[in-house]
Each structure stands twice: as C-alpha cells, then as structure tokens.
Image: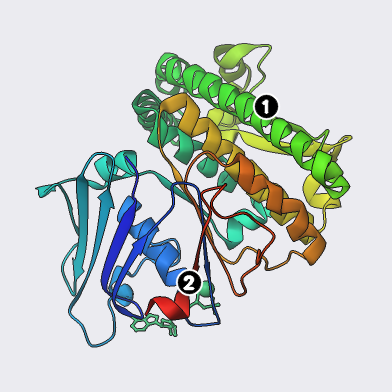
Amino acid sequence: MAFSKIDLRNFRCFDSLSIDISSKSNLFYGKNGCGKTSILESIYVASSGRSFRTSNLESLIKKGSDAFIIKAYDDNTGSVLEVKKAKTKPINIKMNNSRVTISELVRAFPSFSIDSKTFFYNDNAPEYRRKNLDRGLFVASPDYAKDWFGYFRSLKQRNSALKLGDITQAKAYDSLLVDHGERLNSLRQSLIMEVKQIYDDIVYKLIQENQRANIFSNLDIYLKPGFDISQGLMESLLNSNNIDLKRKNTTVGPHKADVIFESKGLLIKDIFSRGEQKLLSILWSLSQNIYLGRAFNLNPILLLDDLSSELDAEMLDCFLPTLKYIENRFVFSNIVDLFDSKINEDEQSFKKFHVEQLK
Ligand SMILES: Nc1ncnc2c1ncn2[C@@H]1O[C@H](COP(=O)(O)OP(=O)(O)OP(=O)(O)O)[C@@H](O)[C@H]1O
Ligand SMILES: [Mg+2]
C-alpha cells in the first residue's frame, strides 16, 4: 500500500493541512520554521507510529490542542489509515476503522528516513549500519523477523550462561544460533549484493550526465558477516569458546556484522568529504529502497529532510538526474526551490510544494 493523500489536524505548527503527494518525487520547500520537517515527520509517524526526531510523541500535538490526527489515503486500494495521539493516551492506529499494531502498520506502509545520522552513515558505529540493514529486511520479510528474534533470544541465553562460566550450557544454544544466524547472514548478503548492483547502475548513469559522479564509482561495498565465513558459524563459535568464556560474551556471529564501504582498500569515512559522504548515503538509501520495492513487492517511502545542507551547487547538480531513476515515493525538503526550471515536473511525476502557501 502507499499513501497518495495525507490530512493533518493539529500536528505541530499545522491546524489543518491536506496534501496530495506524487507516486515519485515530492519536494517541500520554504523558509526556516515553515513546517517542512513537520510534514516529513507526519508521514513517518503515520507509517511507523514513531517520530524520527523525538521519543515524545506528545510534543507533536499542536500547542493548545488536545490531540493530533493524521489521516492517510491510498487511492489505489481505497484504504484509509488514521493515526491519533491524544495527550496522556497511547497512540491509536486504525486501518479502515480497525485497530492495527505498529508492526502491522510498518509492514503495510513502510517508510525509511534519511536523517542527519544516515547522512554520515559511514562515520557511525557498526551497530548503526547493522540496524539500518536489519530494519529494511525486517519490514520486508516476515521470515527475516522470525530468524532475527530467534537469533537474539538464543544469543541472550548463551550470554547468560557465559556470565555464569557454564560453557556446556552456553554451547547448548549453538545449534539454534547457527540455524537462525546462517539465514540472517545469507539474507543480509543477498541484500547488500543486490543493492550494490542497483547502486552501480545508478552511478553509471549519473556519470554519463556529470563527471563529478565518478567519485561514487568502483567502490567496494560488502558485508562483514561477524564470523569467519570459510569456517561457517558453528566452527567459528567452537573456535571462540575460550575467548567467549574469558569475556563472558559471544564474540562472533551476525550480531557483530558490519557493512563496509571502501575505495581502493581505504575506508570511505577516512577519505570522503562530508558532502561526498552525504550524497553517497542518499544514493545507497535510494538503491536500498528500489531493491526492497522490487524484491518484496513493497511501496516504501523514502524521506529526506534538508537535501542541500552540506551539498554545494555542483554536488546538487550531480544528484539531480537521480530523480529519473526513483521507483517509489521519495519525499524530501529544502529551504529553497532547488530545481526551478531544471526539471520537467510532468515527465518525472515530480511535485513541488511551497510550504508557506499550503497554510
Ligand atoms: N507542538 C507544536 N505546536 C506548535 N508549533 C510547533 C510545535 N512543534 C513545533 N512547532 C513549530 O512548528 C514550526 C515548523 O517547524 P519545522 O521543524 O517543521 O520547520 P522547518 O520548515 O523544518 O524549518 P527549518 O528550515 O528550520 O528546518 C516551527 O516554528 C516550530 O517552532
Ligand atoms: Mg526542518
């Protein structure tokens, strides 16, 4: 499912607002404080029950009001989603008038946000990249979610046994850990490979239009599985028994995985400038969204707040042609109307909204 229309009531600075979004690119522009982030946030809340900025959903209720309501409509299926948050009450989510849980919501309307942390994806700790990778697969594949829970349940029990110094008890969880862990690893591997293929195709096309995009080509992007793949997970666990006992923790396995971005053996975070890192993160997230859409028959929305921060005019020009290759909804914001006459709005199902004029 996918939103085509969104109505807001008492959401942050908006009393009431109704927006028809395009199935491809949507730019919300306007001056500081006009409500760009609020609009993107409302889409994220409607598709995940959470904010990408704050854990306090109550702060999103317009000052002086008692509740916010976000309604989203899917023109293709006729589905209506209603997300309501009243002061001191938990969030209430209904799809076609029936209550749904957050995990049902996340699967029905997946959305991913490129926020200030994702901009510098490569500068973050491995845990951040693992989470990012898992979230996509989690939403896309119920089997992955089952293995993920199974793996982390066994890992927790194994670690409790290690804390007691009981290696026999710890090893009793190995076969479950291996079973779930090998499957997690192979789905992660195939996601990275497929996303890399899409990423390479996009970069190749960008280079035809702008030589500056050359910097994004010929990168080595791969999954470090968290264990020695030539030995397999079972063997790796056996070989690390002594270290695990000493550290009272399981030191190998998919919970130690990372996604590595390198150029000629050097880590991207050590060589790319901030603008280059940001654009790389955007291109990677877009490629991941295309993959999730194609492979799992989803319609994921990608949200990007403040496109041009950190990017100079040349970098923006380098990014612009990417909009042609977007396959799902892309909703992004910027202070100024970046594209002016540079883009043919009809041809690319590209919609622009001047936020001050929406009120
Ligand atoms: N709960 C609320 N009630 C009323 N107004 C709010 C609430 N929360 C935030 N605001 C106001 O909403 C306005 C829009 O904020 P928002 O972050 O969406 O602006 P923006 O267009 O993204 O600005 P910037 O370009 O600075 O990022 C701000 O003036 C902010 O102070
Ligand atoms: Mg903002």
Say if disc 2 is inside 8 Å of ligand 1: yes
Q: Secondary structure at mark 2?
A: helix
| In the rendered image, the vertical position of residue 26 relative to residue 183, given as above or below | below
Contact, CB < 8 Å: mark 1 with mark 2?
Answer: no
Expressed as whole percent of the image width and height from the top left, the position of residue 336 reads 62, 74
Expressed as whole percent of the image width and height from the top left, the position of residue 137 reads 46, 32
Say if disc 1 is inside 8 Å of ligand 2: no
First-in-chain label (1 vs 2): 2
Residue most extreme to the bottom: 64
Quarter of the image holding residue 62?
Answer: bottom left
Residue count near mark 1 (Cα–Cα under 10 Å), binned few <14, some 14–19, many ≥20: some
The type of residue carrying mark 2 is Lys
Q: How far apart are labels 1 and 2 at the CA level?
A: 33 Å
Expressed as whole percent of the image width and height from the top left, the position of residue 206 reads 76, 42
Report which residue position mark 1 lands on. 197
Residue at image point 44% right, 15% down:
179
Q: Nearer the viewer, residue 296 or 166?
A: 296
Q: Secondary structure at mark 1?
A: helix
Report which residue position mark 2 lands on. 36
The type of residue carrying mark 1 is Gln
| In the rendered image, the vertical position of residue 65 relative to residue 221, given as above or below | below
